[in-house]
Amino acid sequence: MSTPSHIATQYLAVWNERDAAARRALVARAFALDASYLDPMMRGAGHDGIDAMIAGAQGQFPGYR
């Protein structure tokens, strides 16, 4: 069972990972296959969509952690 702290640590690791292959692996561990992410500025569905959304955000904010 995951604790809230573990879930938060995984979530932040996904957003902070700049290596595309490593980030994709973290997305696969942190999100269910059919997960959706939605906030007022972006959205992504499934591992591909969530990974692409994070990559896009990283491109807009290089070096941001």
Image (cartoon, helix red, strand yellow):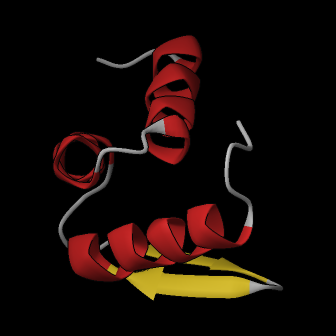
Residue located 39% across and 78% down the image: 52
Note whether 40 is above or below 62 in the view shown: below
Apparent side of residue 8 relative to residue 22 in the rendered image (left or right): right
What residue occupies the far right of the structure in this picture? Answer: 40
Number of residue marks = 0
For residue 16, which quarter of the picture?
top right
- Nearest the eye: 55 or 9: 55
Q: Position of residue 12 (x, y in %)?
A: 57, 33
Quarter of the picture holding the N terminus: top left
Apparent side of residue 53 relative to residue 22 in the rendered image (left or right): right
Note whether 54 is above or below 42 in the view shown: above
- Nearest the eye: 20 or 54: 20
For residue 17, which quarter of the picture?
top left
Q: Position of residue 55 (x, y in %)?
A: 46, 68
Apparent side of residue 7 relative to residue 45 in the rendered image (left or right): right
Note whether 10 is above or below 19 in the view shown: above
Q: Position of residue 29 (x, y in %)?
A: 21, 40
Q: Position of residue 45 (x, y in %)?
A: 37, 84
Residue located 32% across and 42% down the image: 30
Quarter of the picture holding the C terminus: top right
What residue occupies the far front of the structure in this picture? Answer: 62
Residue located 58% across and 27% down the image: 8
Residue located 68% across and 43% down the image: 63
